[in-house]
Image: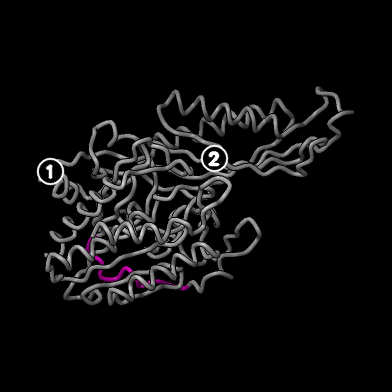
């Protein structure tokens, strides 16, 4: 099993990796991610797994048949796409570990009493079409195809031109979902534990802020005569930082578009995307309201205008407590919450009992080329997932 895991991991390592930064560019339905999908199909075929795909690009490879009325399936897996210039482990670790777990179960002589699926959800990061966990939202019905088909990437390509859409029956008959993921924080490192269990996910979402002003000459326009949306944006970014710190929550402006985007011109428009996260739904609502209020106040002083639109919002999720306890307590694994969103949260919110396993990240860095995990911890994660799946299958 260790050789299988490391061989598979070595196969994935060069796909979509930037020679300049060492980070990964595996955006959905583009060359690198498509290559990973082909790799998954090869791995599934080599193990005799039955592959099913829906019209949204989600895939499940089933071992031991497919779920039906008489056999509720166990699903594991994660995603293969990345953020822009992302790390190696976020997503693919869960997919490779799931394949290695199937190998491990077979080596143990486990004959599944119900089907086991390895799932890969599309566009988990929202790096191309702007909605996080897009594939799982569509598969569960949390987002309708009518609302999603018009989503466009940065080149203006609509989602409806990339996938067939429609409806999905891919999760029919799934009784339990377990997702293994690299931890995106230092909780396990601080506890000196290679593996942990998630208790839940913070409330989180993305908001677009459009700041509008008057384009003008950067040299001839007096400072007091300007209606500069960049100034309003800058003060809003500072306000977001301050409000999040005061409340003990999270707020980040990480994406920016400027028009006309000239060095010697005052902008006419600045569009900025806020990623905000709160321990509760109410905390998140209060945080975004405070940031938006300060943005509007500043716009009034700057002679600019601001519009705020929510692009995706997910409420706080508590994973199935009985399942989490059954996994963690007998093995002495720590239980901790996460501020990162996952497909597991979408499936739990849709009524599928769900658990998450975390593998230690020694630096806590994620969504970055510096994301890391020790091979020994990854292998401990594979063993942990194999143990959990064996219990669930029996």
Q: Residue at x 20, y 53 (%)?
A: 383
Q: Which numbered circle lies on residue 230?
A: none
Asked whether 342 or 365 is in front, the reply is 365
Residue count near mark 2 (Cα–Cα under 10 Å), binned few <14, some 14–19, many ≥20: many
> Who comes first in sequence, dot 1 or dot 2?
2
Residue count near mark 1 (Cα–Cα under 10 Å), binned few <14, some 14–19, many ≥20: few
Placement of 371 over or under 111, stated as above or below: above
State which quarter of the image contains the C terminus: bottom left
Q: Is residue 138 magenta?
A: no
Which residue carries the number 2 mark?
274
Q: Residue at x 44, y 62 (%)?
A: 122
Which mark lies nearer to you, 1 or 2? Answer: 1
Secondary structure of the residue carrying tag 2 is strand
Q: Residue at x 29, y 34 (%)?
A: 189
Asked whether 196 or 381 is in front, the reply is 381
Which residue carries the number 1 mark?
329
Dominant secondary-structure state across the stretch colored magenta: loop
Percent coordinates x, y for residue 270 in the rendering: 69, 40
Q: Is residue 173 magenta?
A: yes
Magenta-colored span: 166-176
């Amino acid at each position: 099993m260790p050789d299988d895991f490391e061989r598979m991991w070595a196969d994935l390592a060069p796909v979509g990796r930037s020679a300049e930064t060492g980070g990964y560019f595996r955006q959905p339905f583009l060359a690198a991610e498509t290559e990973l999908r082909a790799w998954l199909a090869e791995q599934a075929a080599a193990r005799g797994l039955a592959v099913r795909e829906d019209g949204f690009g989600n895939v499940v490879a089933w071992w031991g048949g497919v779920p039906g009325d008489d056999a509720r399936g166990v699903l594991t897996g994660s995603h293969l796409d990345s953020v822009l210039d992302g790390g190696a482990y976020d997503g693919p670790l869960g997919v490779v570990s799931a394949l290695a777990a199937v190998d491990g179960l077979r080596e143990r002589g486990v004959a599944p009493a119900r089907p086991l699926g390895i799932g890969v959800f599309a566009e988990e990061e929202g790096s191309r079409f702007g909605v996080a966990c897009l594939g799982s939202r569509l598969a569960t019905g949390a987002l309708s195809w009518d609302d999603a088909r018009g989503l466009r990437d940065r080149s203006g390509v609509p989602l409806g031109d990339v996938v067939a859409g429609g409806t999905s029956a891919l999760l029919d008959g799934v009784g339990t979902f377990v997702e293994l993921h690299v931890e995106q924080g230092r909780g396990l490192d601080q506890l000196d534990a290679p593996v942990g269990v998630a208790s839940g996910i913070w409330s989180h979402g993305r908001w677009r802020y459009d700041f509008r002003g008057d384009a003008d000459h950067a040299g001839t326009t007096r400072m007091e005569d300007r209606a500069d949306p960049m100034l309003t944006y800058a003060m809003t970014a500072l306000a977001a930082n301050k409000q999040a710190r005061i409340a003990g929550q999270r707020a980040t402006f990480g994406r920016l578009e400027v028009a006309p985007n000239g060095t010697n011109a005052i902008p006419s428009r600045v569009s900025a995307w806020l990623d905000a996260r709160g321990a509760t739904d109410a905390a998140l609502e209060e945080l975004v309201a405070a940031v938006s209020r300060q943005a509007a106040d500043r716009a009034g002083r700057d002679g600019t205008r601001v519009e705020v639109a929510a692009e995706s919002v997910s409420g706080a999720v508590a994973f199935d407590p009985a399942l989490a306890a059954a996994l963690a307590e007998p093995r002495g694994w720590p239980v901790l919450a996460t501020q990162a969103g996952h497909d597991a949260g979408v499936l739990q919110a849709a009524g599928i009992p769900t658990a998450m396993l975390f593998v230690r990240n020694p630096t806590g860095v994620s969504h970055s080329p510096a994301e890391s995990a020790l091979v020994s911890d990854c292998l401990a994660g594979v063993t942990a997932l194999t143990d959990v799946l064996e219990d669930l299958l029996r």
